[in-house]
Amino acid sequence: MRSAKQPNMNSPLSQANPSRLRRISTALHNRPGLFLLLLLSLPMGWMLIVYIGSLIGLLIQSFFYLDGFTGQVVKEFSLRTYQGLFTESHMEIFGRTVAMAAAVTVGAAALAFPLAYYIVRYAHARLKALMYLLVLLPLWSSYIIRVYSWKLILAKEGIVSWFLAQLGLTPLLDWVLRLPVIGGPSLSISSLGLFFVFLYIWLPYMILPIMSALERVPKSLADASGDLGGRPFHTFRYVTFPLAFPGVVAGSIFTFSLTLGDYIIPSVIGDSSPFIGMTVYSYQGTSGNIPMAAAFTVLPIAVMAVYLVTARKLGAFDAL
Amino acid sequence: MNNHENTAIEFNQVSRHFGEVKAVDSVDLTIQDGEFFTLLGPSGSGKTTCLRMIAGFDHPTSGQIKLHGRDVTNLPAYDREVNTVFQDYALFPHMSVGENIGYGLMIRKVPKSERNRQVRAMLELVQLPGLEHRKPSQLSGGQRQRVALARALINKPKVLLLDEPLGALDLKLRQQMQVELKSIQHEVGITFIFVTHDQEEALTMSDRIAVFDMGRIVQTGTPSELYERPRTSFVASFVGTSNILSGETAQKITGSAQNISVRPEKIRLVAPETETADSFCAADGQVTAVVYAGMITRYTVALAHGQTMIVAEQNLDDVSKSVATSRGKQVRLIWPCSANNVLQDPE
């Protein structure tokens, strides 16, 4: 390759090299299988060893167990860890996390769809580029910084409380914060605040797939629906939304699984009720119970598998 | 012409400007009920914009559009009794053929059993019986075309709009669909407005044609009117092939310097110096190209004054017997003077 890039005119090799390259390319051209193998071996190797391999490692670990007396991991097949997993307090953590992930997903879809629709269908080229930039802009700065910023924004003396006070809406805020489950002493120490921050952090991951799904829906289909008597609502209900739904599902895989696994946001914002990620973190860190951490991690994977199969059954991927 | 009972579409000084661009410029147009009317023109001439304004996907910057006497200028598409067959068919990919065809009825809350009955009847009409459970992706181009037609016709529109619907089909299928569209129009008896850039297709199918150029209608007429008596050199050369004679050449032949057009097939090639009757026009020249095209042979002849004429002779006899089989031969071109068409080109 190098000699081809820097041909040495004085060397007799300079004539031989291009023909060698040509021989290689001819050989590859005649053996498409070999070419594909060369192309895919690196990414496939990465996928198999690093990605799938670590998942399998995780699964194996979850069948080991921690000896209560010695504090050592016993590397024997056992269902003991799973017995310990399905306890009431663990299930509470699990339920809380899944509920939050579901709420964040629904909220993100509700916010992202109209925005993506506007960007794809109405914004002209320059505005579209600007909107793209604005959607991606938050991803340029550190996630931890942004989470801590939100802690300040949502704090009792923060800008949200101040703004609501200016509008005379403080009683409304107090009323919302007194509600069970979602309330708390202030927005930054409530599940509602936690929901807002999750929503903010994962929203771009919902907007982008919906945008690309909407880009693939030809404008003429909306025209055709209108032509056949469909009002804008019908067109949305029967044509645009079903065709863009794979984008919503793709986005929801991001928002749902990212919320399921996150352990930083719930430890900074909210009332410190544990989430799956935090629990996994503390099991593998402080208590050194790697098998329990692994078993806990298998849960979200199972949830996602059930979710994808259901989405497929519902026809979410039919329009792909 | 002003009888509203028989008028399907009426354009009154309709313009559609996109910023500086005048896509459609002061168009007046009247289409009779039951006509097969074609909007013909090169791309960007404004024909599709006109169709979109009839459908309601686009609205005029100024002017008025009436549909069966009712002002629809600013009405949205879903409030108009017209349906469209789209250029790319625009079938809903996530719905079956039956659901596609029944879409309009579903929107109007027609009960499912009645809907299914009508869908089956429509599939019969477009000769695709039994395909209602297929997905559009499982159909061929010609079949999709028919589904798009059925989906539009099931709503019993007063006017059917067709936006270059045959553009994506191969020649054989296209000619078959041309005949079929005509017979379907005959059967359902409604107005068809057809957009195409293919002049041959326009001539074969239409009752009347409006020729568009640069956002304006240049000429409206029956196929034979347009072909035999084109008004401008644009129409003369866009609809079929024409020899356009101007200046000295025209002066010498017709005695007037006005531009004239003569169709290549009206002209015969004879030996130089051949005497002709007074009712014939003649010109002398040299053959510069001979193209054999099966049914005809096309000769290019260079006249004095630098003009060239195309002559199309039917290959009735063996081609080799023709007077001008080879390049470089001197010939005389003769044609009945009645074939001269005086053009009114804008200055």
Image: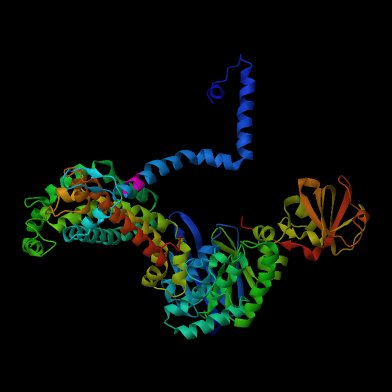
- Across and down, in percent, residue B335 comes to 83, 61
Main secondary structure of the magenta stretch: helix
Residue A236: percent from left, percent from top: 38, 68
Residue at the limit of the structure toward the top, as seen here: A10
Q: Looking at the image, which residue is at 49% across and 77% down?
A: B102
- Residue depicted at 51% across the width and 82% down the height: B116
Nearest the eye: A236 or A70 = A70
Q: Which image quarter holds the N terminus of chain A?
A: top right
Q: Is residue A56 magenta?
A: yes
Q: Is residue B88 left or right of residue B172?
A: left
Q: Is residue A255 visible?
A: no
| Quarter residue B88 falls in | bottom right
Q: In the figure, is residue B302 to the left or right of A281?
A: right
Q: Is residue A260 above or below residue B32?
A: above
Q: Nearer the viewer, residue A312 or B291?
A: A312
Q: Horizontal placement of A151 versus B131: left or right? A: left
Q: Nearer the viewer, residue B92 or A295?
A: A295
Magenta part of the protein: which range? A54-58
> Does the magenta segment cover residue B262?
no
**Residue B344 in the image, given as x and y percentages of width and height:** 66, 61
Q: Position of residue B188 (x, y in %)?
A: 60, 82
Q: How many marks?
A: 0
Is residue B61 visible in this depiction of the protein?
Answer: yes
**Of A35 and B286, the residue lying toward us:** A35
Side of B237 relative to B267 (left or right): left
Q: How is the image coloured?
A: rainbow
